[in-house]
Amino acid sequence: MTDRVHVAVALDGAGWHPAAWREHSARPAALTTAAYWRDLVRAADEAGVAFVTIEDALALGERFDTAPEPRTDRVRGRLDAVLLASFLAPLTTRVGLVPTVTTTHPEPFHVATGLQTLDHASLGRAGVRLVAGSTPAERANFGRRADGPTGLPESGHVEEDPQLVAAFREAGEVAQAIRGLADSWEDDAIIRDLESGRFVDRDRIHNLDFSGEFFSITGASIVPRSPQGQPLVTALAHQSIPYRFAAEHADVVFVTPADPAGTGAILAELAEAAAQVRTEPEPLRVFVDLIVLVEDTADAAREAWDRLEARAPLVTDARIVVGTPDDVVAEIRAFAEAGVDGIRLRPARLPADLNAIAEEVLPRASALLVGDDGAPTLRERLGLPRRASRHTRSEVSA
Amino acid sequence: MSLNPAKRQIHLAAHFPGVNNTTVWTDPTAGSQIDFASFEYFARTAERGRFDYLFLAEGLRLREHRGRIHELDVLGRPNTLAVLAALAAVTEHIGLVGTLSTTFNEPYELARQLATIDHLSGGRAGWNAVTSSDAFHGANFRRGGYLDHADRYVRASEFAEISKALWGSWQDDAIVADADAGVYLDAERIARVRHQTRLFDVDALFDVPASPQGRPVIVQAGDSADGRDFATDHADVIFSLHTEFEDAQDFYRDVKGRLAARGRDEESLKILPAATFVLGDTAEEARERSREIALAQVRPETAITYLEQVWNRDFSGYDPDGPLPEVEPDTGPESAQGFANRHAAVRARIAKLRETAAAENLSIRDLIIRLTANHTFVGTPEFVAGEIDRYVQERATDGFTVVGHLTPHGLDEFTDRVVPLLQERGSYRDTYEDGATLHDLLGLPAVRTGAPVGV
Ligand SMILES: Cc1cc2nc3c(=O)[nH]c(=O)nc-3n(C[C@@H](O)[C@H](O)[C@H](O)COP(=O)(O)O)c2cc1C
């Protein structure tokens, strides 16, 4: 019998298809409203989705978009994902909240404390998807660093552009800072000791003293340790350098095999990278990304897909599944058999395909899915134990 | 009783207790300063009390004492922006204002974060722009080092200008979302923001649509001449420390007097000084409670630590109930708190302490009580309500930023006992108007960014 898998859902604007906002079921004028996101994430929460990811970027256009004016036929404009996730935390109960963070421009210290706070507000459901950043548009928006990649090289291989490779090294430092600051307060640093008059025991709070190639951080976090200890660190990876980055720093990696048969090679490459660079104690969890469009019949699904594609073709590395709820279940089964830990479904249309996932797909897939056993935190729900702070002194036995 | 139009309206902000000695954690009822439940409780109380906004301070590095982490006071707090965003989900009316540095942020990112909170809260976001710029805090940030003191308000001012330009860069109707025509965006209605100076090199297209308030409310809390200029140029509210009546009136007159020259109306800048309070059924009981609370706020070790921070010396052998130490300070290269203190400032500070102590023959502990636990309003609820009303009617303030000494329920008593009396006086709202933005609550002129030009 194959192992059961987790299901996550990736949220972005009106959905992953660039023409999705033109569907009747879309709410294109509401994409930056509280109500829109509350409805989406509550639907995922109630359906038992393990976590949702929320896309973000630090520029108006798409990555490496060089046009001086924004496109007018695509969804443009969004909210800060970490804050959106924080807003959603008190409105949900079980679902993990995994916002995207671009690693080049934001202050790693702010990113880390923001994620710790998300973990406090959600009582242990915080994660992050790290994106190695720095596009020309982002650099112009910030105006602080002139250097950086201008696009993917012709070959598409990250390793051929030293600037892109550097961006991944910087993302690695950000991951280290996030984990290190999360560990800087031991669990029991707050002692409220009336006798000595001390609120904290300073021996249980540790300065980070991180000094890297791209930035340094001296102090401890301003935020006491959060329910999960560390947030769930995730990344999307399509090729060698990102695989290596994920193998070294992530808890969960999202990958994009063309079909179930192509999964083995990716798992093998990840395992090889992990054998070389992984320092995290738990094995890397691998989720497969699937773009899904779901209708009651195959014909209706095909018709909807053709309508979208006629308006704006979707360009993606991820496998696309257009069909009935049973078709999506069959895909989940095939990838589960290929040995992955989870599936991240990217709804082609929001809210339509999310609702179909919640109401039609997940109930039919229940025999394939890891159930929610009420684990107290997102990490534990995914089978990752809560970490003790790296500074917690092991008991010295006499 | 509803608002009396003949009276000046009182504005109140609710300051979540901070990480200094005035927040009493030794009280058996004191709760977590970090659990979200504490913030939610506090926000609900403030909303029940019809406050204009909830206010969070910010500290970007844990306080230290003589090179080690300060242990005696509440320590640690959440990320300001993330808490405000979460609070937007559990409140309906109250403004949400956070203290955020202009030195250790970049305009594009902070502007999009504040605009995000403004969207999620339906127009209730605010920003207390502070300029702390020392190396101690800088050591946690990419910038490292520190910004020259003289440049802190130059950067703050340009930061505010860029932010305002970004917030105003999307016209209200930039999103067309015409599905049939396939037009989502009208690119003509989004302006590029360029700002090239010695301190910034921004050429930006903002990625957050115009938010409900147009821009968040801007608060300023700094007392220097440069700080006041920043306030009259950019702020909607000043969080001051001037609470003594005549001093408050002077400050009020000075600041409001500068507005006309900048083409601003007096009502466009509100002054809400920090205020503490202690209530009692009688004046006598209130005075006793005030003394008890002060003693909890300034424990013997707190008093000694305070002096050690100023002198940068070990005073563990001194009696907190005795006189000030006679010794000279150790004016090393930098002060213990990390603020880039100059030697002269330390000496001037000590001279001031000696003067105050001598004038009233105060012990170390009583001196520190005088400095950090001198409660603004002490008396019966009737007295406190009367005083607040008097300050506002007689133009000493537009209201107060109220801070209690207990987390998270330190505001309960004020809300239950003082607020109804303010409402009876007709100078404080008894309901929120549906859909009011924070600008509306504060009686500030609305900001309409890029509203379509009339037909
Ligand atoms: C009432 C008040 C509250 C303040 N709160 C904060 C705070 O929470 N965080 C912070 O970094 N600075 C805080 N400050 C300091 C800064 O506002 C200010 O940037 C700094 O003192 C330098 O400005 P100045 O020279 O004009 O006073 C506060 C100042 C005042 C007067």
Image (cartoon, coloured by chain):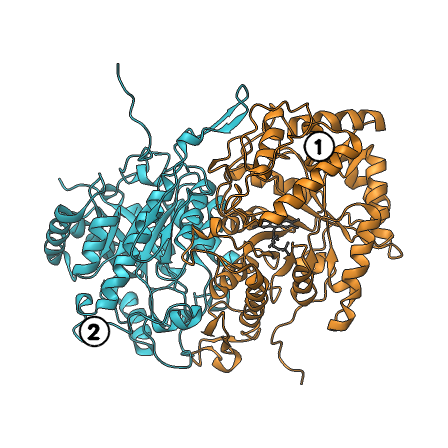
Quadrant assignment, res B377 = top right
Question: Which image quarter: residue A132?
Answer: bottom left
Q: Secondary structure at mark 2?
A: loop
Q: Categorize mark 2 by other alpha carbons within 10 Å: few (<14), some (14-19), many (20+).
A: few
Q: Residue at x 80, y 65 (%)?
A: B257
As shown in the figure, which amino acid type bears the numbered disc 2?
Answer: Pro
Residue at the extreme bottom: B455
**Chain for disc number 2:** A
Q: Chain A in the picture: what colour? A: cyan
In the rendered structure, the answer to whether residue B323 lies left or right of residue A65 reads right
The C terminus of chain B sits in image quarter:
bottom right
x and y percentages locating residue A126 in the rendered image: 39, 45
Q: Nearer the viewer, residue A196 or A275?
A: A196
Q: Is mark 2 within 8 Å of ligand 1?
A: no
- Residue B418 visible in the snapshot: yes
> Which of the two residues, A55 or A320, is positioned nearer the viewer here?
A55
> Chain B drawn in what color?
orange
CA gap between label 1 and label 2 equals: 67 Å
Q: Residue at x 71, y 27 (%)?
A: B363
Where does the image place residue A251, in percent across and percent down from the top left? 26, 46
Depth order, front residue of A379/A320: A379
Please state the chain letter of the residue tagged with numbered disc 1 in the rendered image. Answer: B
**Residue B25 to residue A282: above or below:** above
- Res. B205 visible in picture: no
**Is residue A249 rendered to the left or right of residue B28?**
left
Q: Is A40 on the left-hand or right-hand side of B415?
A: left
Find disc 1 in the rendering and name its residue: B367
Badge 1 element: helix
Of tags 1 and 2, which is closer to the observer? Answer: 1
At which x and y percent is residue A100? 37, 56
Q: Which residue is mark 2?
A: A153
